[in-house]
Amino acid sequence: MAEKTKNIELLSPAKTAEIGIEAIKHGADAVYIGAPKFGARSAASNSIEELQTLIDYAHLFHAKVYITFNTILKDEELAEAEQLIKKLYEIGADALIVQDMAIFEMDLPPIAIHASTQTDNRTLEKVKFFESIGYSQVVLARESSLEQIKDISSNTNVALEAFVHGALCVSYSGQCYASQALCGRSANRGNCAQICRLPFDLQDSEGHSFGKYHWLSLKDLDLSASLEEMIEAGISSFKIEGRLKDVDYVKNITAYYRQKLDDILKKHSSWYRASDGYSNYTFVPNVCKTFHRDATDYFYNGRHYGIASLNTPKSTGEFIGTVIYSDAKSLSLDTKAILYNGDGLCYLDDKRQFQGFRVNRVEGKMVFPAESLVLKKGTQVYRNSDIEYERILSKPSAIRKIPIPIILQDNILSASDGVSNATVIISQEKIIAQKPQDENIRFQLSKLGDTIYEASDIEVNSNWFFPSSILSDARRRMVAELNKLRIETHPKTQACIKKNDVKFPKTELDYTGNVYNRLAETFYKRHGVLTLQRAFEQNAQQNVALMFCKHCIKYTLGACVNHPNPDVPILKTPLQEPLHLIYKNYYLRLQFDCKHCEMHVIAE
C-alpha cells in the first residue's frame, strides 16, 4: 500500500514580527503571533504594520502566518474584533487561531479558522464537531496520548496540530480559572498570573506537611523523539510553545526541530515540508542551551512519574557535572563542559532550594564564582546561561535560501522556483562578444547573497556581450519579479465555515463553556445547547473547580490505588484527605475524580 502524501508543518512562536522573521530564517514552515488585540498573551501584541512585514517575508518562502485570536470576547468588543479580522485577512494572514465561538456568528472574510488549544480539544466528539462547522485545523490537547491521537485522526479528516515542545499548563487549556479567581486576571483573556508555578505547602486534613514544593509546576514538553511516530499517527503540524519567549529560544528550538523533521522527511518520499528553502546555521541547536525546565513527554506514552518540576519553575538548563571540591572562593567540577566567564550556574542546596550564581573567572576545571559560596562534594551543577552560546545567537545565526536554476538565452534572463518562472529582457543593442564571457556572466548572475535565493545552476546560451552593470541590473529585476510571483502564488487555505445546526457534544454548559458574549450564546443554542451559564469572568462562583488537571499529586505521592506508582516509596500511613495546597493567603483544596483520572483544584 502506497504511503499517503503529507505536508508536514513546523509551527514556531513569535512574540514580535522580528522574532517571527527569525523563526522563518531558522526553518519554520509557519509562525503564530498575536495581533493588536485578542491574542491570549497581553504582553505579546503586534501592530498591523508589523504583521504585514512578517507576512510579506514569510510568503516569500510560502511559509504561513497564523494570528492568535484566542481570547474570549466581551459583547462590547465584538464589532471591533470583526473589523480586525477583516483587516488581518486584507494583509494576507493565513489563518486565525480561535477560542470564542462568537467568531462563527460574524460576517467573516474567507479566512481559515484553527481551533485553539484553549477550546479544550481532548475528545474525538469535540474534534468531529469542530470539523463539521468548518475549522480547517485543530490543536489537540497537550495531554493527548499516542492512542488518542490515532483514534481522533482515523475518525476525522481535519488537519491535526500538536504541541511538541515548551511550557505545559497543569490544567487543561481553557479550563483554568485560578488566576481570575485569586488575582482578578483571566487566563482566557490573556492575563494568566501563573498560580501553578508557586511554591505550595502540601498538607493533609490533620495538618501533616508533605513539604513546600512547586506541586503544580510541570517540566517542559519534549516530544522530539516521537516526531515520526506522530506523523504516522496523523499529526501534520508540530507546534513549539513560546509566544513570550525571547529570540534566542525561538532560533534554537526552531532549528533543532527543523533538523529533526528534515531527517525524517528524507526517509519518506511522500512526506514533504510545508514551505520552501533550507537553512544553514552558525550554531549547533541544543534544547538545553536556552530556557529549559527539564523535559517530559507528559501523557503521550501514558501516565508515569516525573512530569512535575517540583523544586523550581525556573530554567535549570543543562547538567554539566558534579562538585569535587569547594571553598568560599572557588570550586572544582568534574565536567567535560567548557565554561566561560559570565556563565550562569545553578544547583539545589541542602534544603532542595534552587540557587544560582554567575561565574567570575574560569581556570581549567576551577570555577571562581562572583560571590562567596561553598557547595558540598557531589552537588550536581547545571548551566542555565551559556554566555558564549548566547553571544552566537545574538548575531545573525541562520541563512535560509531557495535554490533556483538560472538561464540566459540570448538576451532573455529567466529563473524558476519550480512553480513560477520569472523572465526579464535585457534591452540593449546586440553586440557579439569578441571573447568568451560565460565565466563573467555566471559570476555576475550568481551574486544573490542579499536575496533569499541561491543559484543551483546557471546555463548560458548567448554570444551577446553584456557589461557587468547590465547583468547586475537584470539579476535584480529577475529577483524582484520572482519575489512578486512567489507572493502571488503563495498557497492559501480558504475558509470552509459551515453555518449549520450540527449538535454540540453537550446539551448543557456550565462556566467551563467560557460563554462571554451574546454571539457565543447564539452559537451554542443553534447547535443544540439547551442551558448554559455565562463565563466565570462574568459570573464568578464559589467552591467550584478552578483547575482541571490530568497531573495528579496523589499519584506523585505514590498514593493512587488505581495506578500504583512504582517509582516512589509507599506511604507509611494512608493520606488523610482532603489535601490542601497553601501559599500565603491562597488555600486550595484538592479533589480527586478517580473515575476520570483527574485532579481538581478548588479555592477555599
Image (cartoon, rainbow, N blue to C red):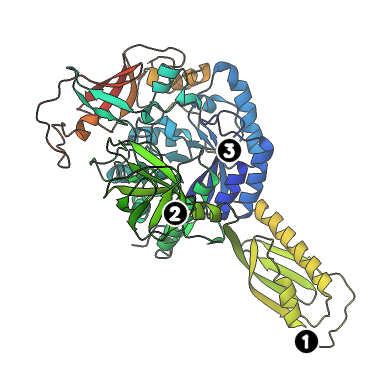
- Dividing the picture into quarters, in which one does residue 494 lie? top right
Please determine whether, in this image, residue 48 is positioned above or below residue 1.
above
Residue 160 visible: no
Q: Residues within 10 Å of mark 1 (few under 14, many from 20)?
A: few
Q: Mark 2 highlights which residue?
A: 257
Residue found at x 59% / y 59%? 400
Q: Is residue 160 left or right of residue 486?
A: left
Q: Which residue is mark 1?
A: 436
Instruction: Please tell me which residue lies in front, 123 or 438.
Output: 438
Sequence order check, earlier mark of 3 and 1: 3
Residue 111, numbered circle: 3
Label 3 residue SS: loop
Of discs 3 and 2, which sits in the foreground? 2
**x and y percent of residue 173 in the render?**
39, 31
Check disc 3 and give the amino acid type: Ile
Q: Earlier in the sequence, mark 3 or mark 2?
A: 3
The quadrant where residue 525 appears: top left
Circle 1 — which element?
A: loop
Considering the image in quadrants, where does the N terminus appear?
Answer: bottom left
Q: Residues within 10 Å of mark 2 (few under 14, many from 20)?
A: many
Residue 321 seen in this snapshot: yes
The alpha-carbon separation of the residues under discs 3 and 1 comes to: 54 Å
